[in-house]
Image (tube, grey):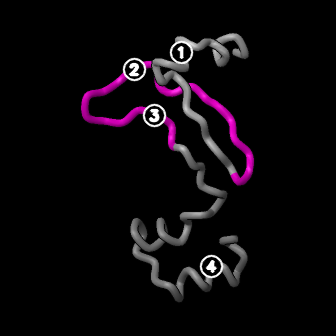
Amino acid sequence: MAEAIADPQLAERGFFAELSEGESRFRCANQPYLLSRTPTHARALLAALGEHGAAVLREKLGFDDAQIAQLRAQRVLG
């Protein structure tokens, strides 16, 4: 893997993405194929554990702020 990550041709072709988590940065492989209308590259920033939990509960499950607060009070959510 170290040899592949150091390959300048793969880097030039956009085979790798550099991701970050807090202050840490690392490289990973993008998908080995391209689609004409759908991005296949890795996202540049990773979400923290639970970072989008409240938004998902609101948008996908229809929870309101009171229900989310109750889940937090019960320590179901961080």
Residue wearing tag 2: 33
Which quadrant of the structure image shows residue 69? bottom right
Residue at the (51%, 22%) spot, across then down: 15
The amino acid on which the numbered mark 4 sits, given as a three-letter code, is Leu
Q: Which tag, 3 or 2, sits closer to the chain's start?
A: 2
- Nearer to us of marks 1 and 3 is 1
- Element on which disc 2 rests: loop
* Number of residues whose C-alpha sits closer than 10 Å to that of mark 2, classed few (under 14), some (14–19) or many (20 or more): few
Q: Which tag, 4 or 1, sits closer to the chain's start?
A: 1
Q: Which tag, 4 or 2, sits closer to the chain's start?
A: 2
The amino acid on which the numbered mark 3 sits, given as a three-letter code, is His
Q: CA distance from mark 3 to mark 4?
A: 34 Å
Judged by its main secondary structure, the magenta piece is loop
- Element on which disc 4 rests: helix
Q: CA distance from mark 1 to mark 3?
A: 14 Å
Q: Which tag, 3 or 4, sits closer to the chain's start?
A: 3
Q: CA distance from mark 4 to mark 1?
A: 46 Å
Residue wearing tag 3: 41
Residue wearing tag 4: 71
User: Is 6 placed left or right of 40 in the picture?
Assistant: right
Q: Is 37 or 64 nearer to us in this picture?
A: 37
Quadrant where the image shows the N terminus:
top right
Q: CA distance from mark 2 to mark 1?
A: 13 Å
